Image: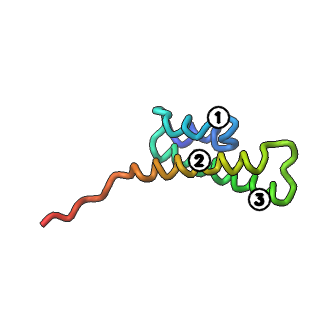
Amino acid sequence: MTTQDIGHFLGDVSLHFKHPDDIASNRDFSRQQKIKLLRQWEHDLQLLLVASEENMTGSGASQGQTGETLKVVVDALNDLEAERPAGPAKVG
């Protein structure tokens, strides 16, 4: 899938995916695309937390739910980034 193909997901990642694992386990996305989607979701959640602290959230999810989702997103990102192939090993 190309970057253009995932572009429509980036506007509101949580609208298209119920759980971060839905992205992490998706075989249609490359590792970089998964990271890009999860980074956007992380950014959106951080903005929601700030808005919540300033009593500007409206009738959405609570700050606790947002914080829990943020933790799961960060965990999924950490897992994907840990899968990064190692560089060449120095031999000799």
* Quadrant that contains the C terminus: bottom left
Residue type pointed to by label 1:
Lys
Element type at mark 2: helix
The residue under the point 52% across, 46% down is 76
Compare marks 2 and 3 and give the one earlier in the sequence: 3
Q: Position of 57 compared to 21: left or right? A: right
In whole angstroms, how far apart are the C-alphas of marks 2 and 3? 17 Å
Q: Which mark is residue 48?
A: none
Q: Position of residue 59 (x, y in %)?
A: 86, 42
Q: Are marks 3 and 1 in contact (CB under 8 Å)?
A: no
Residue type pointed to by label 3:
Val
Q: Position of residue 40 (x, y in %)?
A: 62, 50
Q: Are marks 1 and 2 in contact (CB under 8 Å)?
A: no
Q: Which mark is residue 50?
A: 3
Residue type pointed to by label 2:
Val
Residue of label 2? 73
Say above or below: 23 vs 48: above
Compare marks 3 and 1 and give the one earlier in the sequence: 1
Crowd band around label 3 with a 10 angstrom C-alpha radius: few (<14), some (14–19), many (20+): few
The residue under the point 52% across, 43% down is 34
Crowd band around label 2 with a 10 angstrom C-alpha radius: few (<14), some (14–19), many (20+): many
Q: Position of residue 77 (x, y in %)?
A: 52, 50
In whole angstroms, how far apart are the C-alphas of marks 1 and 2? 11 Å
Q: Position of residue 46 (x, y in %)?
A: 69, 55
Give the quadrant of residue 90: bottom left
Q: Position of 73 compared to 31: left or right? A: right
Q: Nearer the viewer, residue 59 or 39?
A: 59
Specify the farthest residue to the bottom: 92
Compare marks 1 and 2 and give the one earlier in the sequence: 1
Say above or below: 20 vs 89: above
Element type at mark 1: loop
Q: Which mark is residue 18?
A: 1
